Amino acid sequence: MISNQQSLNLSPFMAIYDIVVPKDNMLRQMSNLVDFSFVQEELQNKYCLDNGRNAVPPIRMFKYLLLKSIFDLSDVDIVERSKYDMSFKYFLDMAPEDGVINPSSLTKFRKLRLKDINLLDLLIQKTVEIALEKEIIKSSAIIVDATHTKARFNQKSPQEILMEKSKLLRKAVYQIDEKMKEKFPAKTTTNELTDELDYCRKVIHIVEKEESIREYPKVKEKLNYLKEIVEDHREHLKSSNDPDARVGHKTADSSFFGYKTHIAMNEERIITAAVITTGEKSDGKQLQSLIEKSRETGMEIDTVIGDTAYSEKDNIQYANQNELQLVAKLNPNITQGIRKKEDEFEFNKDAAMYVCKAGHMAIRKARTGKKGMNENQKDTYMFDIEKCKICPMRNGCYKEGAKSKTYSVTIKSTEHKEQEVFQNSDDFKKKSKERYKIEAKNSELKHRHGYDVASSSGLIGMHMQGAMVIFSVNLKRIITLMKESK
């Protein structure tokens, strides 16, 4: 049950915050910047208003998740820190003497309260509204790109993941006391998941008993991480892979297993839209959605800056129809010819190869036809026939008994003449130099906020993680821009 009335904190110790949380503290600045009442309004129908025990205020629960994204900590560690960090307590709207929540409440809040809410668009909309209100957005251009996030359990078996995490914990323990090797049980020799889970639980139990060791930060973090996998994600460890994650390709020689976050960002480096997909999806296909979502936030857009993935024919036509300049270099392979939409393969711009519906990438390509002849040249892509023979999606794609599988694309450079002229202009070259900004933003998401690896399993969890991380980086950027404008 939650109350419609905001409670007034009457603690006699509230004045402590004025002493220990300075005005330039980031969390104090965020509290002053954002009216978090929108969270309660959005979640109102997820709680009972007149029956049951009083629930932890949804705004506080939401702020806990926000702190988790900002500082890239486990549920247990973020709650632990809120016991003694006064800036955390201030941000959470707690009295200095208040007790903290049980970390398991955060899992329930994510699964029960935030389910079925379009959190990603809601939080981006909120931050862009704040930026527009503070008049710190001056540009009318957006920069687009995609960043990949590996699935939490990657393509390793559940046993391998548990072995890796328990090894990291033991290694941290040995750095403090090598004699602990004698206390740990013998490693499992079977390939059974239940045996590996039992082994991890024993390791956890032994470390938790060693009070002088478990309190070391490097041990504590790895201990909590292993516990979180064993306890909160036990159901996901029964399957070898994340059920929603897919194989995507970064280059011709490297791939990842997970998700993609397609991002639009203005020149002030505030993210204006995001679309989260499985890893195999094409970057270019998300452009129109990113533009429309950015405009829905109130952004005025006249220029879109991206790489070759965004210069496909449909996007050029869309840009022309919407009076937008598309600053994206042409790639002749993007044009799909007369093939039906449902039969099209996805083009991976990093590897410069096509990927079939099953996620298999072409292994080589050849150009056929002669320049200057009436017939257009084609790029023909060859696939690994052995994979095609056993592919579960081979019906209608691979002809039984065929000795090769190819995919041909007609090169129609004449359809891109106007874009080619623009591409060679000084204006294009000047604007394309802004693209580095989004690469730096992707790096910030991954290396400062843990966005390189999914924090949970499934596309829904990925949406939630993306929403909180993007909300965090946008608020931090707004605070920085406000300081610079003074």
Image (cartoon, rainbow, N blue to C red):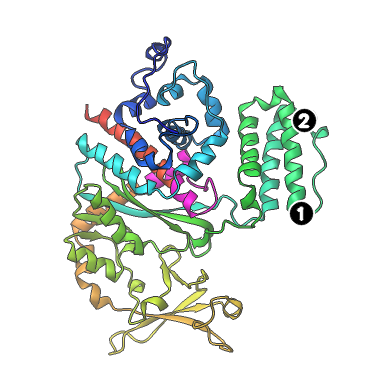
Q: Nearer the viewer, residue 138 or 374?
A: 138
Dot 2 amino acid type: Glu
Label 1, on which residue? Answer: 192
* 1 left or right of 39 in image: right
Q: Tags 1 and 2 in contact by the CB under 8 Å rule?
A: no
Q: Name the secondary structure under disc 1.
A: loop
Q: Residue at x 36, y 37 (%)?
A: 39
130 relative position to 447: left or right: left
- Residue type of the residue flagged with mark 1: Glu
Q: Is residue 296 above or below residue 332?
A: above
Residue 20: in magenta span: no
- Going from N to C along the chain, the mark reached first, 1 or 2, is 2
Q: Quadrant of residue 95?
A: top left
Look at the image and give the residue range highlighted in magenta.
440-465
Residue 370 quadrant: bottom left
- Give the x, y percent position of residue 459: 48, 54
